[in-house]
């Protein structure tokens, strides 16, 4: 069994980007500038956005955090989005999800300029991804593909079962895994909450990608020997004995499933750190495209 070490790989990617940014600086070019918009004070979102901004500083990017109050109106948020679209200093930006309930998420994401949409959430970018065109691929599916690539996990002709059909993970990764290429060329089954025979499917899987958000859902008796496991779940489970009052766990019963797996991502330290690295990579791409 080999651990797919997202922390290690994400650090490598960040080092590679750091070198590129230093070269940009030496050439007297503008360095990439990422902005993040956060509305409200959701605990996990504060952590993620803080981490994204810190990573920018570390690798030499410019970064701007726009933290708006929970009661921000949809109209004001849209104004902020238009301002970012029109600000030539900003190469790419993200609007951290989830947004407060009174704001129409779809409306906001549709307003983001696709050329600055480093999250890859805009329909234009999602559509390009589905058609194999150059675009911004969302950080989580992009991170999974990069992890499989760097560990040379063989995906060709394999049966990949994706659990979960969310717009930001399940749906796009099911498309990417079936695309021509390496990684890719996989035969994909996309399972979801209405799937009736999930265990039957996962038992046939060479690769399971779980993006469900149910702690320890995938058990050892649901997978075959030699399976590759990508665990995208990150759930905070309340635990008074921990300093933070919770611990983080994935969708997979790691202790038991890892005994049968050939490759497996841990939680934390698997897919999670990769997402930040890929967001930075997209921001670098945005800068390069704006330069071109
Ligand atoms: N919330 C959870 N994941 C993400 C992400 O990748 N991007 C944004 N903007 N919000 C998120």
Image (cartoon, rainbow, N blue to C red):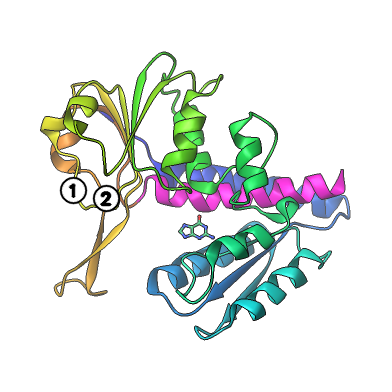
The C terminus appears in which quarter of the rendering? top right
For this rendering, which residue is in front, 260 or 84?
84
> Is-magenta flag for residue 284?
yes
> Which quadrant of the structure image shows residue 186?
top left
> Which quadrant of the structure image shows residue 127?
top right
Q: Is residue 108 left or right of residue 27?
A: left
The N terminus appears in which quarter of the rendering? top left
Residue 147 appears in the picture as rendered: no
Q: Which residues are magenta?
A: 269-292
227 in relation to 258, above or below: above
Question: Could you tell which of marks 1 and 2 lies nearer the N-terminus?
Answer: 1
Looking at the rendered structure, which numbered label has been put on residue 250?
2
Dot 1, how many residues are within 10 Å of its Cα: few (below 14), some (14-19), or many (20+)? Answer: some
Q: Disc 1 and disc 2: Cα gap in Å?
A: 6 Å
Residue 143 appears in the picture as rendered: yes
Q: Is residue 265 left or right of residue 87?
A: left
What secondary structure prevails in the magenta region? helix
80 in relation to 206, above or below: below
Q: Residue at x 13, y 37 (%)?
A: 256
211 in relation to 28, above or below: above
173 in relation to 193, above or below: above
Q: Secondary structure at mark 1?
A: loop
For this rendering, which residue is in front, 43 or 186?
186
Q: Which residue is mark 1?
A: 216
Is mark 1 in CB contact (under 8 Å) with mark 2? yes
């Amino acid at each position: 069994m080999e651990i797919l070490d997202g922390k290690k790989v994400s650090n490598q990617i960040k080092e590679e980007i750091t070198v590129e940014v230093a070269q940009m600086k030496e050439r007297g070019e503008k360095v990439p500038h990422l902005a993040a918009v956060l509305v409200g004070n959701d605990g996990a979102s504060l952590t993620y956005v803080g981490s994204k901004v810190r990573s920018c500083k570390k690798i030499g990017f410019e970064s701007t955090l726009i933290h708006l109050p929970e009661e921000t109106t949809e109209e004001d948020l849209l104004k902020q989005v238009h301002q970012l679209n029109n600000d030539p200093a900003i190469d790419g930006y993200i609007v951290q999800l989830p947004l407060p309930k009174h704001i129409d998420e779809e409306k906001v994401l549709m307003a983001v300029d696709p050329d600055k949409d480093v999250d890859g959430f805009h329909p234009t970018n999602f559509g390009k991804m589905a058609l194999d065109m150059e675009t911004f691929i969302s950080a989580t599916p992009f991170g999974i593909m990069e992890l499989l690539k760097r560990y040379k996990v063989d995906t060709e002709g394999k049966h990949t079962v994706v659990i979960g059909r969310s717009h930001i993970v399940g749906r796009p990764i099911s498309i990417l895994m079936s695309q021509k290429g390496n990684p890719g060329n996989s035969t994909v089954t996309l399972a979801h909450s209405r799937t009736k025979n999930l265990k039957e499917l996962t038992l046939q899987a060479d690769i399971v990608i779980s993006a469900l958000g149910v702690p320890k859902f995938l058990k050892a008796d649901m997978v075959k020997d030699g399976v590759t496991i990508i665990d995208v779940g990150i759930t905070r489970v309340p635990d008074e004995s921990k300093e933070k009052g919770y611990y983080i766990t994935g969708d997979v019963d790691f202790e038991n499933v890892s005994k049968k797996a050939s490759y497996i991502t841990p939680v934390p330290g698997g897919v999670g750190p990769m997402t930040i690295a890929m967001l930075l990579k997209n921001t670098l791409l945005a800068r390069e495209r704006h330069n071109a």
